[in-house]
Image (cartoon, helix red, strand yellow):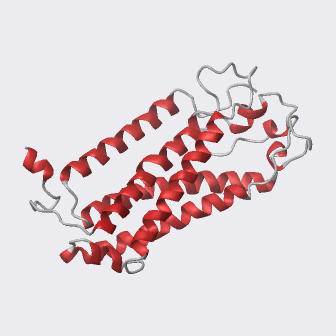
Amino acid sequence: MTEWWLASLSGAISHEIAPWAYWHARCMVLAWAVLLPLGALLARFYKVRPRQDWPRELDDKHWWHGHRSLQWGGVGVMLVGLWLAWSQGGAGGAVAEGTMVDSRGTAAVVHAWAGWAVCVAACLQIAGAMARGSKGGPTDARLRGDHYDMTRWRRGFERIHKSLGWLSVVAAVGVTGLGLVVADAPRWMAAALVLWWALLVAAFVVLQTRGRCIDTYQAIWGPDRNHPGNRVAPTGWGVRRPLG
């Protein structure tokens, strides 16, 4: 059994891969299978912490600092992995050249271009977050703000940011899986990633079922209907407003 788990997905006993390629893979797995999904889960389910006395305690920023750190860190690691691949031959040739793909050359090119797509999406997420508009609200010197007033700009940002973020994470699962096939990775690596993704999906289902996906607006300003954003429907699927 040990030999079976150590063997490559194709069944080959030996597994050779260029150093740049396995560092590229490590960076991308760390970014897309660990940091970015955890940051997305944190933003969706921990705007109000389990032991927080909400709505007496409002605007707990632990989720924000954690989400920002994980996403920036993930994109930074991703860019290192992207540079490692790009420096070896551009969009598609690097993977085919740096790994023992044989007849999997087409898969290598698909993996490369799909990888570029999710990487561009991640960079757009960062750019979009920086252009999300002003905050406003009672704790801001300027009461009026894009978020507090839930302007059209803010609603558009939230729709795009949430949709593109989760679509990118889901797409990255397929891109990573294809990368394992292209690199003819050891079976234990594939099994470990499948188990990890299963745990992430299970965590998502449990937290969603428990009603942990609380509206950002209420998490920050509470359920009072005098706040203008509480008179606008929350953005996104499965977002809960416990009160109001």
Quarter of the view holding residue 20 = bottom left
Task: Find residue 155 and report its horizontal and vertical position in percent.
Answer: 74, 51
Which quadrant of the rendered structure holds the C terminus? Answer: top right
Residue 103 is left or right of residue 87, and the answer is: left
For residue 207, above or below residue 196: above
Horizontal side of 95 relative to 154 (left or right) equals left
Q: Residue at x 60, y 51 (%)?
A: 162
Q: Is residue 92 above or below residue 172?
A: below
Q: Is residue 237 above or below residue 167?
A: above
Q: Is residue 178 left or right of residue 56?
A: left
Image quadrant containing the N terminus = top left
Residue at x 42% of width, y 79% of height: 90
Query: Residue 65: x, y in percent?
Result: 64, 40
- Along the horizontal axis of the image, is 177 left or right of 217? left
| Residue lying at 49% horizontally and 43% vertically, measured from the top left | 38
Evaluate whether residue 237 shows in this view. no
User: Which residue is at the front of the view, 237 or 195?
Assistant: 195
Q: Position of residue 46 (x, y in %)?
A: 59, 33
User: Residue 198: x percent and y percent?
Assistant: 35, 41
